Image: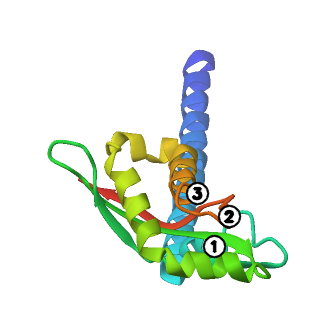
Amino acid sequence: MGLLARIEDEEARGRSLVSVLSAIAIILALAIAAGTIYGLATGSRAKMLARGEAGLPAGSKVYTGLGTLRAASRDKPPAIILATPSFPYPAGDRAFGEELDSKKEALRQAVIKWLSTKTAEELSPAFEAATKAGIRDALNGILDLGEVDTVWLSDFSVVQ
C-alpha cells in the first residue's frame, strides 16, 4: 500500500493545487474584465486625459481651440491620424491667449504638417513622448508671444 498510496495522494494534491490556481486565474480575469468595462462605460481615461496627465498648473487655462485634427501619415498607403491636442497656458497672459486665437488655423496646419511627416510606426504608443514634443515644437514655431511647455493628447489614433 505504500508506493501506490503515495502516488494517489500526490495526484490528489496536484489536482487540488490546479483547482486553486484555476480559481485564482478566473477571479483575476473577471476583475480585469470588470475594470475594463467600467473604464469604457464611464469614459474615465478620456476624462483624465482631458484634465491633463500631470494636472492643471495653478493659474493656468487649457487651450482646446485646435479641436480634432486629421492627417495622413507618410506610409504607402497612408494611415489616417486623428489627434486632439490641448495645452495649458498662463490664465493671466491675455496677449498670449489672443495670439492663440488669432493663429488657430496656422497652429492647426503646423500640427497637421508635422504629423504628416511621420509613419504610423513613428506615432505608436512607444513614441508618445516624442510625438508630444514634436507637436509642441511645431506649435512653438508659430507662436511669438509665449511658448507651449506641455502638450496633452486627449484623443490620438492612427488608423491603417
Pinpoint residue 158: horizontal percent, then vertical percent.
33, 56
Compute the Cα span from label 1 to label 2. 7 Å
Report which residue position mark 1 lands on: 48
- Which is nearer the N-term, disc 3 or disc 2? 2
Answer whether labels 1 and 2 touch (C-beta < 8 Å). yes
Work out whether residue 117 can be spotted. Answer: yes
Residue farthest to the top? Answer: 3
Pinpoint residue 28: horizontal percent, then vertical percent.
58, 57
Report which residue position mark 2 lands on: 53
Residue farthest to the right? Answer: 58
Give the number of the mark in front: 3 or 1: 3
Q: Secondary structure at mark 2?
A: loop
Compute the Cα span from label 3 to label 2. 20 Å
Residue at 56% x, 51% y is 137
- 159, 10: nearer the viewer: 159
Q: Is residue 21 left or right of residue 121?
A: right
Q: Secondary structure at mark 3?
A: helix
Report which residue position mark 3 lands on: 140
Residue at 44% x, 77% y is 67
- Which is nearer the N-term, disc 3 or disc 1? 1
Answer whether labels 3 and 1 touch (C-beta < 8 Å). no
Residue farthest to the left? Answer: 77
- 106, 12: nearer the viewer: 106
- 114, 79: nearer the viewer: 114
Q: Is residue 83 above or below residue 63?
A: above
Q: Is residue 18 above or below residue 72?
A: above
Give the number of the mark in front: 3 or 2: 3
